[in-house]
């Protein structure tokens, strides 16, 4: 898993940059309309799916992590297409993105354990997966949250996650696998 990640550190950094850019854009946009937020998240999901797909396909051999990355990419692409092609209600939008966060979080947590202890910082992927999973569940459990609160929470989470991914990508390049 981590040897593949170290070979694809640029893709990981790009994925983090895309996530960070979405979070900052959504935070900086002065009261975006709901449809603007839907389109912005749809574009983010498409970009994230394309970068994730390139990361998974760029690996030289199949591993549990590359398969998980490919499933994450397919999930993001599907969410992006759904959000860009349809006009979801706020409730449906909340459930769609919550489902994306939950599924990607589960995939990251499950795949981060394979192979065990291959690199010193594997906990970062596990922690990001747990955060995504919990954030998705929070969206599901609070469907009546005001749209403005939801936008701020999603944007802040995405900006923070983007920062973590970029920082993680810079560490990936320096990893030396244990003997």
Image (spheres, helix red, strand yellow):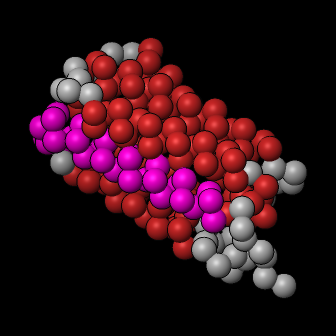
User: Front-most of 108 and 26?
Assistant: 26
**Magenta region includes residue 160:** yes
Which residue is rendered at x = 69% and y = 76% of the image?
119
The quadrant the N terminus occupies is: bottom right
Whether residue 125 sits left or right of residue 174 in the image: it is: left
Q: Is residue 146 above or below residue 157?
A: above
Which residue is rendered at x = 86% and y = 54% of the image?
61
Whether residue 122 sits left or right of residue 92 in the image: it is: right
Whether residue 47 sits left or right of residue 2 in the image: it is: left
Which residue is rendered at x = 47% and y = 25% of the image?
43
Image quarter of residue 28:
top left
Image quarter of residue 130:
bottom left
Residue bounds of the magenta highlight: 143-171
Percent from the top left, x then y, of residue 70? 67, 44
Image quarter of residue 171:
bottom right
Percent from the top left, x then y, of residue 111? 63, 63
> In terms of secondary structure, what is the magenta stretch mainly?
helix
Whether residue 107 sits left or right of residue 130 in the image: it is: right
User: Front-most of 13 and 55?
Assistant: 13
Which residue is rendered at x = 63% and y = 32% of the image?
50
The quadrant the C terminus occupies is: bottom right
Percent from the top left, x then y, of residue 94? 29, 37
**Magenta region includes residue 138:** no
Percent from the top left, x then y, of residue 4? 77, 58
């Amino acid at each position: 898993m981590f040897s593949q990640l170290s070979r694809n550190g640029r893709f990981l950094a790009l994925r983090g940059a895309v996530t960070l850019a979405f979070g900052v854009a959504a935070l900086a946009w002065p009261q975006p309309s709901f449809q603007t937020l839907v389109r912005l998240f749809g574009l983010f999901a498409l970009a994230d799916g394309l970068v994730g797909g390139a990361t998974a396909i760029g690996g030289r051999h199949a591993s549990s992590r590359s398969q998980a990355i490919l499933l994450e990419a397919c999930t993001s692409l599907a969410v992006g297409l759904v959000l860009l092609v349809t006009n979801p209600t706020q409730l449906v939008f909340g459930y769609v993105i919550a489902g994306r966060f939950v599924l990607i979080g589960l995939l990251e947590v499950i795949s981060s354990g394979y192979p065990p202890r291959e690199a010193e910082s594997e906990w970062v992927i596990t922690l990001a997966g747990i955060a995504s999973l919990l954030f998705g569940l929070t969206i599901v459990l609070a469907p009546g949250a005001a749209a403005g609160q939801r936008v701020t929470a999603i944007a802040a989470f995405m900006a923070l996650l983007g920062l973590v991914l970029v920082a993680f990508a810079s560490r990936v390049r320096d990893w030396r696998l244990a003997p």
